[in-house]
Amino acid sequence: MQLCRQYRIPHSYFRGHGDGTWTDLDRRKALAYEDYLKQACPSCGTRAEEWDESVGGDEDAYRAVTHRCIGCQLLADKQKHVPEGDEGHGVKVALIPTSVHAALELQRTTD
């Protein structure tokens, strides 16, 4: 259903049936999936029933772990150099491949 939602296509069409017309079953599946997504905590993505033992959940259903993303680290480091105030308004920090950066630098020096 996640791909159907992303591409905005009916589930039956995704499965190779029909002509892409939304059936009543497709609509019910889409609405049920939206309800399912709404039940997730916006911060951690888990659902209350996953933790609630009275409904089959487990208080140890998940473990908190750490992970370092080098890309996010580079973005945070570069963001520290964005000026404060008006000079920094609208300045965005982005990751681009090294080869693209080299090509852009070469273009700047030849223009």
Image: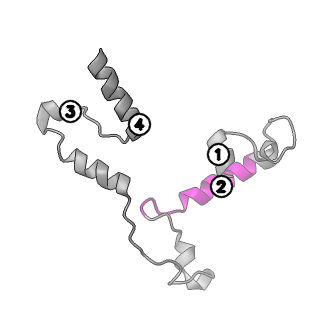
Residue type at numbered disc 1? Arg
Residue 96 on image: x %, y %: 39, 39
Is 61 magenta? The answer is no
Residue flagged by tag 2: what amino acid is it? Tyr
What's the mark number on residue 99? Answer: 4
Residue 4 lies, in percent from the top left, at 69, 46
Give the spatial CA distance, label 1 vs label 4: 34 Å
Determine whether 74 is above or below 84 in the image: below
| Element on which disc 2 rests | helix
In contact (CB < 8 Å): disc 2 and disc 1? yes
| x and y, in percent, of residue 79 in the image | 23, 45
Along the polypeptide, which appears first: circle 4 or circle 3? 3
Mark 4 → mark 3, Cα distance in angstroms: 28 Å
Task: Kindly report the distance in space between the C-alpha atoms of the residues bearing marks 1 and 3.
Answer: 34 Å
Q: Which residue is mark 3?
A: 89
Question: Mark 1 highlights which residue?
Answer: 5
Relative placement, left or right, of 7 versus 47 is: right
Label 4 SS? helix
Judging depth in this view, the residue of 38 and 11 nearest the camera is 11
In this picture, which residue range is highlighted in magenta?
Answer: 27-43
Which picture quadrant has residue 108?
top left
In the foreground, 74 or 45: 74
Residue type at tag 3: His
Query: Which residue corresponds to mark 2?
Result: 33
Residue at 34 percent of width and 53 percent of height: 72
- Residue drawn at x 84%, y 44% is 16
